[in-house]
Amino acid sequence: MIIKPKTRGFICTTAHPEGCALHVQEQIDYIKSKGSFNGPKKVLIIGASTGYGLASRIAAAFGTSAATIGVFFEKPASETKTASAGWYNTAAFDKRAKEAGLYSKNINGDAFSNEIKQKTIDIIKRDLGKIDLVIYSLASPRRTNPKTGITHNSVIKPIGNPFTNRTIDFQNGVVSEVTIQPATEDEIKDTVAVMGGEDWEMWIQALKDADVLENGFKTVAFSYIGPKLTHAIYTNGTIGKAKEHLDKSSKVITDMLKEIDGKAYISVNKALVTQASSAIPVVPLYISILYKIMKEKGLHEGCIEQAYRLFAERLYSDSLELDSEGRIRIDDWEMRDDVQENVIPAWEKINTENVYSLSDLEGYRNDFFKLFGFGFKEINYENDISPIVEIPDIE
Ligand code: NAD
């Protein structure tokens, strides 16, 4: 099969196995270039196949030689259709981990279900005994609550008033104005049910009940705050409500872990191009401007640089500084005054004509296609290759 990018709206429906493998390799090389650091030994990553979860898995495995179990929801290939990028990423990660002599196990299925939780616990008991870190990095448009059987769909909408602002179609560079109507009460509740902390709490409770958590166990879930210009659609919108709930869950979980001296953290991360963030209106235009400014200042980071700082300079450093709300901040460079001061004037002026000079739209687009394994110079995309790639260690 000759595999080229095929896009539908903000998603790419194809992925290139060799390109995804290179993308994973780049991240492994980055972590190796930093040298080993103190860190976890046995890690469960929930949402391990793309974005922040994959980068965390790579940092743990190749930075601290940790054994990793990855849970994700991805599609394998057929003769006529490519696998999803996360499938190819995991195949590449697993291969490299095995070559490095590292334990790696993969579980493909719905992390929100009781069945996948039980399967994970059985594997931990069988292979690792106990784990010392859980990274919770799910981004999903829906969740079926295993207790009620109800499926909730999340929405990305403001709360209270309609929100009008600039947005971009990052494929053709057209900047336009978008108005998003406010969410209903039910939509707010549903979004909290999907992206809030209920499932994180369920995971940690199940792992604790099964007695598979080490003393001093840690768990981290990811959040975002960002500047005022995205607040109406993010922090003060439906997704922000879910993140507020996630924050509360970190406290519930820390209480749950008292006897084993465990702790749950929220890490506030930088805005980055991932499959999840490209679905949010307004945010891709903000990210394009931010990329330009942060690159000019030598402050640009991707998921892997963020994951490195999270592990080596925060979670497992000698002194872990938290903000006034008790959160880890690795969005510190994004939120620096000298960065944000430059975002506002660009935001006010940006339009279809000047988008390439005021933002790094090209960088955004390149990063987007890289998520699916496209745009690597090393790869000849005219080559006819098989889309079928197995993940050796999958249960
Ligand atoms: P992503 O889309 O790259 O990754 C999502 C992961 O969740 C994938 O591994 C996917 O397979 C998995 N997943 C989704 N539904 C699942 C299910 N039902 N069962 C099992 N696995 C499932 O997303 P991301 O951007 O890395 O986001 C991860 C977290 O980081 C989210 O909480 C997000 O809010 C947060 N975050 C993202 C950004 C950003 O700019 N991308 C910034 C700050 C915080």
Image: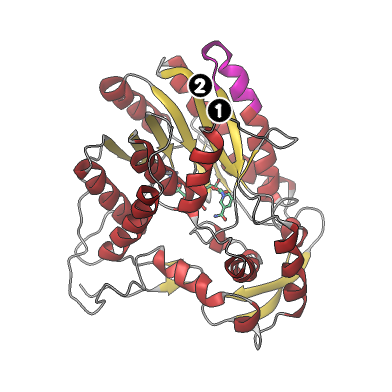
Identify which residue is drawn at 46% across, 67% down. 367
- Classify residue 332 as left or right of residue 304: right
- Classify residue 160 as left or right of residue 191: right
Q: Quadrant of residue 129?
A: top left
Q: Viewer-proximal residue, 321 or 357?
A: 321
Work out which quarter of the rendered image holds the C terminus and state it: top left
Identify which residue is drawn at 25% across, 58% down. 77
First to last magenta residue range: 251-262
Residue position marked by numbered label 1 in the rendering: 201
Q: Quadrant of residue 252?
A: top right
Residue 345's place in the image compared with 373, above or below, is below
- Classify residue 237 as left or right of residue 67: right
Q: Viewer-proximal residue, 76 or 65?
A: 65
Given the image, on which type of amino acid does mark 1 rest?
A: Glu
Note whether residue 90 is visible. Answer: yes
Identify which residue is drawn at 34% across, 33% down. 66
Residue at the extreme top: 259
Q: Is residue 255 magenta?
A: yes
Residue position marked by numbered label 2 in the rendering: 205
> How many neighbours does mark 2 have within 10 angstroms: few (below 14), some (14-19), or many (20 or more)?
some
Q: Is residue 256 magenta?
A: yes
Disc 2, SS: helix
Rendering coords of residue 110 (x, y %) = 40, 40
Residue 80's place in the image compared with 201, above or below, is below
